[in-house]
Amino acid sequence: MANTASAEKRNRQAQKRRARNVQVRTGVKSAVKKVREALEKGDAAAAKAALHAAERTLDKASSKGVLHRNAASRRIARLAHAVAKAAKPAKA
């Protein structure tokens, strides 16, 4: 339990930040999941559209400090690679 006013305030701020970070992380997970589901269905057009939305979500999360810049970039790159691979016609 916090003993000083400043410690109580830091505790309140940490709780607010945690709630906001959880919300952003959940949004990131949902956006990435939509891309993966579109890829599993084999719908390249939907995957591309979902990728664009996921990129925006990941970039916003990294700009707010919820995700590390390189982690967001890595996730975007991996998703983009998977979408590009799905868009290419399979060689016989």
Image (cartoon, grey):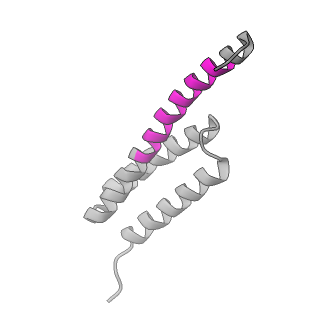
Q: In which quarter of the image is residue 74?
A: bottom right
Compared with 91, 48 (above or below) is above
State whether the magenta stretch is mostly helix, strand or loop: helix
Q: In the orientation shown, which residue stands out farthest toward the left?
A: 41
| Stretch of the chain drawn in magenta | 10-29
Q: Is residue 23 part of the magenta span, yes or no?
A: yes
The quadrant in which the C terminus is found is bottom left
The x, y position of residue 26, in whole percent, is 44, 40
The x, y position of residue 28, in whole percent, is 46, 44
Q: Which residue is drawn at 60% across and 44% down?
A: 67
Q: Which residue is drawn at 55% across and 30% down?
A: 18
Label tally: 0
Compared with 58, 46 (above or below) is below
Choose between 39 and 3: the one closer to the eye. Answer: 3
Q: Residue at x 39, y 73 (%)?
A: 88
Q: Is residue 68 part of the magenta span, yes or no?
A: no
Choose between 84 and 63: the one closer to the eye. Answer: 63
Q: Is residue 83 left or right of residue 55?
A: left
The quadrant in which the N terminus is found is top right
